[in-house]
Amino acid sequence: MVAAAELESWRTELGSLSERLGEFCVRPEPRQRLRQYMAGLLGGAQRRNAWYLAEAAGEAKPYGMQRLVASAGWDADEVCEDLAEYVIEHLGDASGVLVLDETGFLKKGDQSAGVARQYSGTAGKVENCQIGVFLAYAAPGGVAFLDRALYLPESWTCDRARCRKAGIPAEVEFATKPELGRQMLGRALLLRVPHAWVVADEVYGQDRRLRHWLEDRGEAFVLAVPTKEKAWVQGEAGPRQVRVDTLAQALPQSAWQRLSAGSGSKGERLYDWAEIALWRHGAEPGVDRLLVRRSIADPQERAYYLVHAPRKEALEAVVRVAGSRWAIEVAFEAAKQEVGLDEYEVRKWDAWHRFITLALFAHAFLAVQRARVEKGGAVSLRRS
């Protein structure tokens, strides 16, 4: 009885979500197909490409599903903005963390927008793939994505004929991954997404323009940086820049504390941690620190983070924030396994953004349902 009631509740809420998304469709036909598409993404299809989604919906041909993501009258950016609002409505918390990262989508051929031989963290090596940059939201109630952007290598943006063939708008120019991340963070700030910190890995942390941009907006951050990154410290002769790994080598054993960066699939993520006060230049108030993580099994294995905050925070709290970056990796895995984030078969620019946006909405739907079950209550999915 309980299982049947839960299933009926799930179907009702999925219907409400479909109605919400249907508000962005100009015509009734895509509104109806959106419900079928979302149901397929959430478990009704063996795979999440047009053929299997159509089969799950009882359709003999994939053309309707293909048209939904290729040319139907709805704007993926508007839906993505609503995705962020949806996440805020149901998971928003002042202690939330904005997490930047990218993931790779392995592809064959050279026609799909942005595809190139490039390093993919998913594969752990250089592969023929597309790279998507994502902004996730990690909060006490759950983890969901807020935004997405397809990375275009310079080999694409310098070939406008190739871009036109892939449906890439003429105004889209080359942007680094940190630049794409900054754009998404800017949109999140405009939407007033409640949060306390911004975190990201070395790809983003080593970008000084991104760090300065965050500081200018009073944003607290914990950003991973490579060993060669230099940080400002106060020396006897005045402020100077020193490599972060050099600074860490001078730490006494008493500086290290064994702390958990959060729970993982194998229990608490325990490391040894230490911090170093940094010299702060500029008129804006704030506290800058270098956070160092040391492996327990191999003390020579270390990671480095630049930390900026309006005031000095306890080391235990900063360590937890640093560990929250792993939430996006878990979210990527869940989105690929549960809603087929990587199972699309589209080539054009618009189609990629449309499919990814719907998949992220489906993933957010599941995150909200899990939060509802944990709270033991129902959640309204209609827009206020």
Image: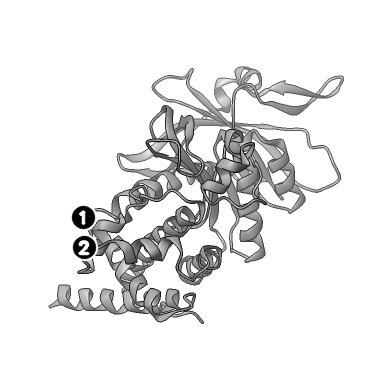
What quarter of the picture does the N terminus occupy? bottom left
Tag 2: amino acid: Glu
**SS at badge 1:** loop
Q: Nearer the viewer, residue 48 or 336?
A: 48
**Contact between labelled residues 1 and 2, with CB atoms less than 8 Å apart:** yes
- How many numbered markers are drawn? 2
Q: Which of the two labelled residues, at mark 2 and mark 1, occupies the earlier sequence position?
A: 1
Label 1: how many Cα within 10 Å (few below 14, some 14–19, many 20+): some
Q: Residue 119 carries which label?
A: none
* Residue 271 vertical placement versus 52 (above, below): above
Q: Residue 248 or 16: which is nearer the viewer?
A: 16
- Residue 44 location, x and y as percent? 22, 63
For this rendering, which residue is in front, 52 or 311? 52
Disc number at residue 46?
1
What SS does tag 2 mark?
Answer: helix
Q: How is the image coloured?
A: one colour
Three-letter residue code for mark 1: Gln
Q: Residue at x 59, y 45 (%)?
A: 314
x and y percentages locating residue 307 in the rendered image: 64, 40
Residue neighbourhood size for the residue with mark 2, other residues' Cα within 10 Å, grouped as few (<14), some (14–19), many (≥20):
some
Residue 55 - label: 2
